[in-house]
Image (spheres, rainbow, N blue to C red):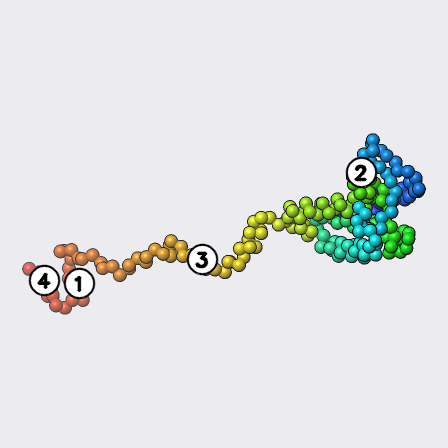
């Protein structure tokens, strides 16, 4: 799933940039939906949304590190939502990385093609959209406690992990333990008047029977 999502995002980005460069290069912007959406071909030497222009090599190295980190994380992947999330991040990162590696003015210094513009918003491309969507999805999954390996952290699990330090303390004595022990040495009841002499007594003579 991760590979499929990454390939879909990457293919959409490459195809859209190819069409934009072929049709909008050196042309006036195309306004759609009453000016709500404008198609304008621009070249960006910075990060997403034209941030940090002039640091192209730095962002190229960062993009390579992001791709490597995602591929290493994918080895422990057992969650479908996280597969979609990482696939979007991977496809978007590779899409912009290809521009930096192969477009003018030079390898590792290539300018990224941006072409989507909304009013009062920086120009971006589909790779930027995939990165933003993947980042938002990652925040939602982390907030819900869903882990990459498919497990889920609940509030109860967090409380148990916090209370783990007091697990070795002795338990308080129960009410049964605090109750006084029964005195098993209590004296037996006194014998009645008809009771005979105690067995084994040599001091009392036996009563004679009349013929």
Q: Which residue is drawn at 82% across and 40% down?
A: 117
Q: Disc 4 and disc 3: Cα gap in Å?
A: 65 Å
In this rendering, the label closer to the viewer, 3 or 2: 2
Q: Earlier in the sequence, mark 1 or mark 3?
A: 3
Residue beneath disc 4: 207
Residue beneath disc 2: 118
At mark 3, the secondary structure is: loop
Q: Disc 2 and disc 1: Cα gap in Å?
A: 114 Å
Residue beneath disc 3: 171
Q: Can residue 69 be seen in this view?
A: yes
Q: Earlier in the sequence, mark 1 or mark 4?
A: 1
In this rendering, position of residue 105 left or right of residue 152: right
Foreground residue among 122 and 208:
122
At mark 1, the secondary structure is: loop
Q: Disc 3 and disc 2: Cα gap in Å?
A: 65 Å
**Occupied quadrant, residue 172:** bottom left
Foreground residue among 201 and 100:
100
């Amino acid at each position: 799933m991760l590979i499929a999502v990454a390939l879909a995002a990457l293919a959409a980005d490459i195809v859209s940039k190819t069409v934009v460069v072929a049709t909008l290069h050196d042309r006036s912007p195309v306004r759609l939906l009453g000016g709500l959406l404008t198609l304008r071909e621009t070249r960006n030497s910075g990060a997403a949304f034209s941030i940090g222009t002039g640091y192209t090599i730095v962002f190229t190295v960062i993009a390579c590190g992001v791709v490597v980190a995602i591929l290493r994380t994918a080895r422990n992947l057992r969650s479908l939502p996280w597969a979609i999330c990482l696939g979007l991040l991977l496809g978007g990162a590779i899409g912009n990385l290809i521009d930096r590696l192969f477009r003018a003015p030079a390898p590792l210094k290539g300018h990224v093609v941006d072409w989507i513009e909304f009013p009062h918003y920086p120009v971006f491309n589909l790779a930027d959209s995939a990165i933003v969507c993947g980042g938002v999805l990652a925040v939602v999954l982390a907030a819900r406690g869903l882990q990459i390996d498919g497990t889920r952290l609940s509030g109860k699990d967090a409380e148990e992990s916090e209370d783990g330090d007091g697990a070795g303390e002795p338990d308080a004595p129960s009410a049964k333990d605090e109750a006084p022990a029964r005195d098993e040495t209590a004296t037996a009841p006194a014998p009645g008047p008809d009771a005979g002499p105690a067995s084994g007594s040599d001091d009392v003579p036996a009563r004679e029977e009349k013929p």
